[in-house]
Image (cartoon, rainbow, N blue to C red):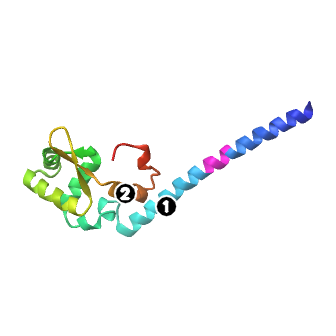
Amino acid sequence: MPDEELAREVQELKKALEALKASFEIVSKMAQAYLRLLNVYAEYGGLSIDVVIPEIKHDPIAREIVKILFDLRKANVSQIARELKGRRGKASRNTVRAKLGELERLGVVRKLPAERGKVYALSKDVVKRWLELIGMPIRFEQTNDY
């Protein structure tokens, strides 16, 4: 009987050790992501979307549209213009439409069919690059959001 008890305790210790190893791996990945963020912050002076999309660095309207699409996920021109007006004080649908065209040509946004017209969303590549930058281990196969 004592041998069985000892074997059971050894098994329990093995399970506890495996759980501890798994926890350590998660903490290690989080620490690596945090250090990566600190390095990006030190290198660029901040964590802005233009770190991932340098083409929009000098275009404040395009940057704000990208931020809006990060917040809303999908939106039509009118919704984006309304949100842009709330954030910047002014916005025209024609300007938004033109900027969305530029962003679409750059591969930053994509046009999607919707019930009424079309909506715009960030490209999966942009979202993936942003998530990699901030160290989020999300795979697109696990979500329908983008």
Label 1 vs 2, first from the N-terminus = 1
User: How far is mark 1 from mark 2, CA to CA?
Assistant: 16 Å
Q: Residue at x 45, y 55 (%)?
A: 135
Q: Residues within 10 Å of mark 2 (few under 14, many from 20)?
A: some
Residue 40 or residue 114, whichever sits in front = 114
Kindly report which numbered mark, 1 or 2, lies closer to the viewer in this rendering: 2
Residue 146 or residue 91, whichever sits in front = 146
Q: Are marks 1 and 2 in contact (CB under 8 Å)?
A: no
Under mark 2, the amino acid is Trp
Q: Quadrant of the N terminus?
A: top right
Q: Residue 119: horizontal and vertical position, in percent? A: 20, 46
Q: Read off the magenta span.
A: 19-24
Under mark 1, the amino acid is Leu
Disc on res. 35: 1
Above or below residue 71? Residue 128 is below
Residue lying furthest top? 1
Q: Residue at x 24, y 53 (%)?
A: 110
Q: Residue 13: horizontal and vertical position, in percent? A: 76, 41
Query: In the visual, does 44 lie left or right of 37?
Result: left
Q: Which residue does the numbered mark 2 point to in the structure image?
A: 130
